[in-house]
Amino acid sequence: MDNHVADSGTGQIGRRALLCGAIALAVGLSTDIASAAVAAQGIKQRKDGKLDIDLSKNPALKKVGGAITIDLSDGSSVAVVRTAAGVKGLTVLNLSCTHNGVTVMQNGNQWLCPAHGSQFTLAGKVLQGPARTALLKYPSSATLKTLTIG
């Protein structure tokens, strides 16, 4: 997101950029890399449109709370989050805030919407509005080696 949006060419910071900055400061937005989702590695798109993720190439998913992100061709992003141990402990979330569609970002053990301050658990459940519904989940299945999304 560009935080240097000019207002009608006057050089003033845009209202949205100002709100995003204020929210980030208010909630203490972390820049700690250890707490931020990392880009996924080892992704293969199948002929049926599903995605296979090589779990061995994504060490962030080894422990509960780890997350990886995948940027899709339509401009949206999804996250794979380790919410529990075992192959059933992986959750795949659409990272578009259910309030206004802005991409949420990981802040410690939560997802935070930089536009209006909605907060979600790592599993996508709403903690604080204005969003009223959880982040959307994608169907997925996993083996010890591969996560399939779709």
Image (cartoon, rainbow, N blue to C red):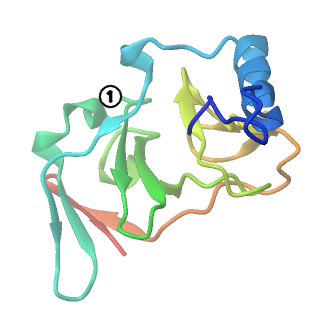
Q: Residue at x 25, y 45 (%)?
A: 40
Q: Quadrant of residue 149?
A: bottom left
Q: Quadrant of residue 120?
A: top right
Residue to which mark 1 is pinned: 63
Q: Nearer the viewer, residue 131 or 59?
A: 131
Q: Quadrant of residue 35?
A: top left
Above or below residue 40? Residue 149 is: below
Whether residue 40 sits left or right of residue 144 in the image: it is right
Above or below residue 120? Residue 10 is: above
Above or below residue 43? Residue 45 is: below
Residue 74 spot, x, y in % from top left: 43, 70
Q: Nearer the viewer, residue 99 or 20?
A: 20
Q: Quadrant of the C terminus?
A: bottom left
Residue 41 spot, x, y in % from top left: 17, 46
Q: Nearer the viewer, residue 86 or 101?
A: 101
- Residue 129 shows in this picture: yes
| Label 1 residue SS | loop
Above or below residue 73? Residue 62 is: above
Q: Residue at x 17, y 79 (%)?
A: 46
Residue 51 spot, x, y in % from top left: 25, 69
Q: Residue at x 72, y 27 (%)?
A: 11
The kind of residue tagged 1 is Lys
- Residue 91 shows in this picture: no
